[in-house]
């Protein structure tokens, strides 16, 4: 057996969890609506683990737009936008995104992951320097590595550490500072005003991945608008797989930057374009958000309610100000047991284990969940409180 195959054969972590009945991944869902989902086998759960922050993935208008686009254009584009896969839908979505988020231009890619690959690896190369937050999303890390630029890390949300790194570098090439707008596991915001000031001082370019802020903060216009700094951030990336209920991604920036990426971002040039259905769904979601900003207020209120209720029950939750509410569990095994106990009570959350983040339950909420949905979730957490908190203390 080769060493590579041996490595696979010796991986037992997932197998051990399956054998213990505690495997929390790749579960099947038969159906879902605004606040609940039905798992394979018929169990209904309150969905507290979705990134569908605005509740648009099942909105009838979004579903109809996707179906209409498929009927008109077909199931897929079968080619890159660079050659034969470009549609008027892609172009219109770019115009609407640029207008809504207040940037001169936008570039739509097939996934949010590819948006980050395209932006970072498209702009940076050997001779450049990328400074990246240690808690940045995996796609940002992979993009930085793919670029072949020099990479330096700075402590999470620590602008003093970033300033020290910028002073020490003495770098003569291009410098890119990379952060998340909202961090996906803690729900905390980046310190954008200080970051923007530092980049201005040292002549660095700032990129904000706003996957979890776009569509949610400041009537949907995201983290940069939340801080009033859209004009001061040269590059914003986002995904359609969260608040926009579809799949795909985009880079927002000045026209010359976007035009450069159109002709240099390999993630765009060598990948089939986003399907007609996905593109139309994202466009319809954006138009709905523009006309229904109440969704942003509703999701914030729902998350705040759950944060208060979980804290009152004695759970340790993070300092999030977003729809993401992490619940500390202590260690890997305690996390898996807590996740399983909640499933038994009809509450679905996400079990997060290293290397994604420290062990925790990641809960998240949507604009269309009712108080009845949330109270069912609270009741589930209350029912397992002693056992979950006991596991956490033991850990």
Image (cartoon, grey):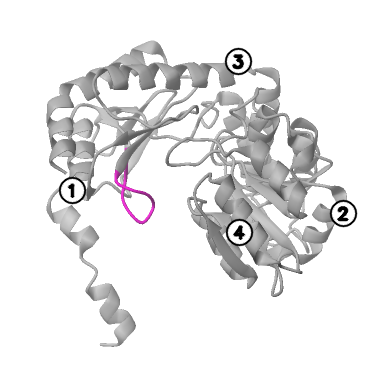
Characterize the local packing of mark 1: few (<14), some (14-19) or many (20 or more) Cα atoms within 10 angstroms: some
Characterize the local packing of mark 2: few (<14), some (14-19) or many (20 or more) Cα atoms within 10 angstroms: few
- Give the structural element (helix, strand or loop) at label 3: helix
**Is 365 placed left or right of 41 in the picture?**
right
Residue 303: percent from left, percent from top: 44, 22
Q: Is residue 217 visible?
A: yes
C-alpha span from label 2 to label 3: 35 Å
Q: Mark 1 or mark 4, which is nearer the start of the sequence?
A: 4
Label drawn at residue 294: 3
Give the camera-side residue of 236 and 278: 236
The stretch in magenta equals 350-359
Q: Residue at x 74, y 45 (%)?
A: 252
Label drawn at residue 256: 2
Instruction: Write down the quadrant of residue 215 in the picture.
Output: top right
C-alpha span from label 4 to label 3: 41 Å
Question: Which is the main secondary structure of the residues drawn in magenta?
Answer: loop
Q: Is residue 210 above or below residue 43?
A: below
- Give the structural element (helix, strand or loop) at label 2: helix
Q: Is residue 107 visible?
A: no
Label drawn at residue 153: none
- Give the structural element (helix, strand or loop) at label 4: helix
Q: Which residue is mark 4?
A: 165
Residue 241: percent from left, percent from top: 55, 41
Give the camera-side residue of 268 and 297: 297
């Amino acid at each position: 057996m080769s060493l590579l195959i041996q490595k696979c054969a010796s991986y037992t972590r997932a197998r051990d969890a399956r054998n213990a009945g505690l495997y929390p991944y790749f579960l099947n869902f038969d159906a879902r609506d605004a606040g609940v989902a039905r798992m394979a086998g018929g169990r209904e759960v309150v969905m507290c683990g979705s990134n569908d922050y605005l509740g648009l993935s099942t909105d009838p208008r979004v579903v109809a737009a996707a179906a209409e686009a498929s009927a008109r254009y077909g199931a897929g584009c079968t080619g890159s936008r660079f050659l034969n896969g470009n549609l008027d839908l892609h172009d219109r979505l770019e115009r609407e995104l640029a207008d809504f988020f207040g940037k001169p231009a936008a570039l739509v890619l097939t996934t949010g992951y590819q948006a980050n690959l395209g932006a970072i690896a498209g702009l940076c190369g050997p001779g450049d320097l990328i400074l990246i937050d240690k808690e940045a999303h995996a796609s940002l890390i992979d993009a930085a590595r793919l670029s072949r630029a020099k990479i330096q890390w700075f402590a999470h949300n620590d602008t003093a550490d970033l300033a020290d790194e910028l002073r020490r570098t003495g770098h003569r090439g291009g410098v890119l500072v990379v952060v998340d707008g909202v961090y996906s596991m803690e729900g905390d915001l980046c310190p954008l005003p200080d970051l923007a000031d530092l980049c201005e001082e040292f002549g660095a370019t700032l990129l904000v991945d706003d996957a979890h802020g776009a569509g949610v903060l400041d009537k949907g216009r995201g983290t940069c608008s939340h801080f009033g700094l859209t004009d001061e951030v040269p590059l914003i990336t986002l995904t359609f797989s969260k608040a926009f209920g579809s799949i795909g991604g985009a880079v927002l920036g000045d026209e010359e930057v976007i035009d450069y990426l159109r002709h240099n971002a390999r993630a765009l040039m060598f990948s089939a374009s986003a399907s007609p259905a996905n593109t139309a769904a994202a466009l319809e979601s954006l138009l709905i958000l523009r006309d229904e900003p109440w969704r942003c207020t509703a999701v914030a209120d729902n998350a705040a309610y759950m944060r208060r209720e979980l804290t009152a029950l004695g759970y340790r939750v993070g300092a999030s100000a977003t729809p993401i509410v992490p619940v500390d569990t202590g260690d890997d095994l305690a996390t898996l047991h807590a996740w399983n106990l909640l499933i038994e009570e009809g509450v679905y959350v996400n079990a997060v284990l290293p290397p994604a983040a420290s062990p925790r339950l990641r809960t998240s909420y949507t604009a269309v969940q009712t108080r009845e949905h949330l109270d069912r979730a609270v009741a589930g957490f209350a029912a397992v409180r002693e056992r979950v908190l006991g596991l956490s203390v033991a850990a």
